[in-house]
Image (cartoon, rainbow, N blue to C red):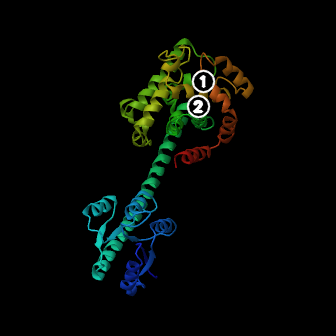
Amino acid sequence: MKNHKKRILFVDDEPNILDALRRTLRSFRDQWEMVYMDRPEDAWQHLLQQPCDAVVTDINMPGMTGLELINRIQSHEKTRDLPIVVLTGLQEPGLKVDALRLGAVDLLTKPIDPTQLIARLENVLRLKSHLDQLKRQNEHLVEQVTRQGLELKRAQLRIIYRLGRVAEHRDPETGNHVVRVGAISRAIGQTLGLPPDYVEQLAWAAPLHDIGKIAIPDRILFKPGPLTPGEWAVMQRHCVFGERMLREPPENILPWGAWSGLNLALLNQSDPLMDMAATIALTHHEKWDGTGYPLGLAQEEIPLESRIVAVADVFDALLSHRPYKGPCSEQEALQIMETKAGNHFDPEVYAAFEKALPEIRQIRQQFEDGKEEVLEKAIHEHEVHFV
């Protein structure tokens, strides 16, 4: 395979200097491609259009000076890795120091010594080759880390969604509720204009809102009729229990057998995510007017993420089948929710929910109950946002 010829750009306003360079380097034309220019302005435009491997420039030139050219080269993303050799007849040490400070890697004094010139050019071209190799290795490393990061995120999402499904009803036919709550929460957060990182973390954390239901007995969780006051008190404990599960090591809460097969270490690697999920688990049943549970928080005492998930959760639950009720129509669900805006729900969050309804309808259609492939669809939706 033929080696790529190195391209060197020479810039000097004196024609006799450029002619001397041509004569000196004539025997290297098979190894190097050499470009000669007498105006720094033209040289700069050439660099933006044609990649080079090194630049040799004079300092004292009319119009744009050599120092200005060096500064432009070092300041531009496309050219800042170019090694620069300063070629000058000036004796002022201050200008040479300025050139080095701006990024020049070597200095040559006129009149040109052919041996020194060739040796310096070979050195800077070798330096450029090493820099290019390091850059390629770094890009490859970044690509590997990114790929591994995506695999870790996929693993985290699978665990989050499957835990959420277990917590919701231990039934894959209705477990897609947690996927929809995450997606609807994202849609509301985006409509509110919240920061993208916050919105994406919210979409990850929301599916674990009812994780504490793992601790609720089936006879209460699946009871087809109204709960007794005692049963309702037990049901309300799922908020506190869910928060504990997400903030404490799982072995401190349940016997190890209850966590068999779940690699929870993957979840614990993301503390901000688990902190938000724990906050949502604890406070997503709080109400704007202070009548919710378990803490009786009101208005902005309730964390914003929980106010968002509360709207997403109730809307999707109203439209879903439950052991104690059939699904509502969308019109019925919206009528019920409108009566709760301003007392149960943050009015600003509810307004964003209404504005996002077209997207929310698509989410419900995309992530219907009973579709196992919904899990991979949901993971893909997250990847679209975090890649």
Q: Secondary structure at mark 2?
A: loop
**Closer-to-camera residue (135/73):** 73
* Residue that badge 2 annotates: 192
Q: Residue placed at 53% from the left, 18% from the top? A: 299
Q: Residue placed at 42% from the left, 66% from the top? A: 62
**Closer-to-camera residue (351/270):** 351
The image shows residue 373 at horizontal and vertical percentages of 62, 46
Mark before the other along the chain sequence, 1 or 2: 2
- Do the CB atoms of the residues marked 1 and 2 lie less than 8 Å apart? yes
Image position of 53 with respect to 251: above or below: below
Which residue type carries mark 2? Leu
The image shows residue 256 at horizontal and vertical percentages of 39, 36
How many numbered badges does the structure rendering display? 2
Which residue type carries mark 1? Glu
Mark 1 → mark 2, Cα distance in angstroms: 8 Å
**Closer-to-camera residue (20/116):** 20
The image shows residue 318 at horizontal and vertical percentages of 66, 26
**Quadrant of residue 327 in the image?**
top right
**Quadrant of residue 182 in the image?**
top right
Q: Secondary structure at mark 1?
A: helix
The image shows residue 69 at horizontal and vertical percentages of 41, 63
* Residue that badge 1 annotates: 348
Q: Residue placed at 64% from the left, 18% from the top? A: 340
